[in-house]
Amino acid sequence: EVQLQASGGGLVQAGGSLRLACAVSGFTFDDDYTIGWFRQAPGKLREGVACIRVRSGELYYANPVKGRFTISRDNAKNTLYLQMNSLKPEDTAVYYCAALYGSTWYCMSELYDYWGQGTQVTVSS
């Protein structure tokens, strides 16, 4: 059974950093999966932030986070990370990690089958 568990959210001032973690079980990073980070702010649609095709390591970043957010991973721990730097108030949202079986270039939430619980990120101005 595929399970994902996101953690690491919190309250940070604008310009600060946070690192989110997504612990994965049910598959390894040698398998053909795509994992994504998504966020949903109050009153807004869920949006893709960054996605990785875990077998190849190919990455996608949404324009609003390019140059500020970085995906990394620890294969031994089967954990994916999202390093978030230079945080802005508009980054405030609940962040989720999700996975789908197969490799896709699309970082769109409706394609992803397996979801972890969200973790709240709040950036104060």
Image (cartoon, rainbow, N blue to C red):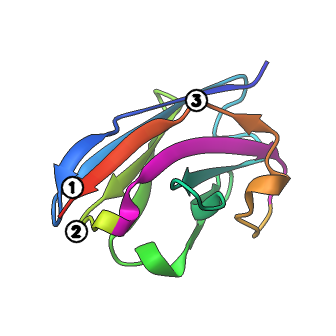
Please tell me which of labels 3 and 2 falls first in the chain: 2
Bin the neighbour count of mark 2 within 10 Å (Cα to Cα): few under 14, some 14-19, many 20 and up: some
Q: Write down the quadrant of residue 50 in the picture.
A: bottom right
Residue that appears at 16% across and 66% down: 15
In this view, the residue farthest toward the front is: 43
Q: Is residue 17 left or right of residue 121?
A: left
Quadrant of the image containing the N terminus? top right
In this view, the residue farthest toward the bottom is: 63
Bin the neighbour count of mark 1 within 10 Å (Cα to Cα): few under 14, some 14-19, many 20 and up: some
Q: Label 1 belongs to which residue?
A: 17
Q: Is residue 71 left or right of residue 109?
A: left
The label number, if any, that marks residue 86 in the structure image:
2
87 shown above or below 115: below
Bin the neighbour count of mark 3 within 10 Å (Cα to Cα): few under 14, some 14-19, many 20 and up: some
Q: Label 3 belongs to which residue?
A: 117
Marks 3 and 2, how far apart at CA: 24 Å
- Residue 56 can be seen, yes or no: yes
Q: Secondary structure at mark 1?
A: loop
Residue that appears at 59% across and 42% down: 97
Marks 1 and 3, how far apart at CA: 21 Å
Q: Is residue 12 left or right of residue 69?
A: left
**Residue type marked 3:** Gln
User: Magenta region: which residues?
Assistant: 90-103
State the predominant SS element of the stretch in magenta. Answer: strand
Q: Nearer the viewer, residue 80 or 98?
A: 98
- Residue 57 can be seen, yes or no: no
Marks 1 and 2, how far apart at CA: 6 Å
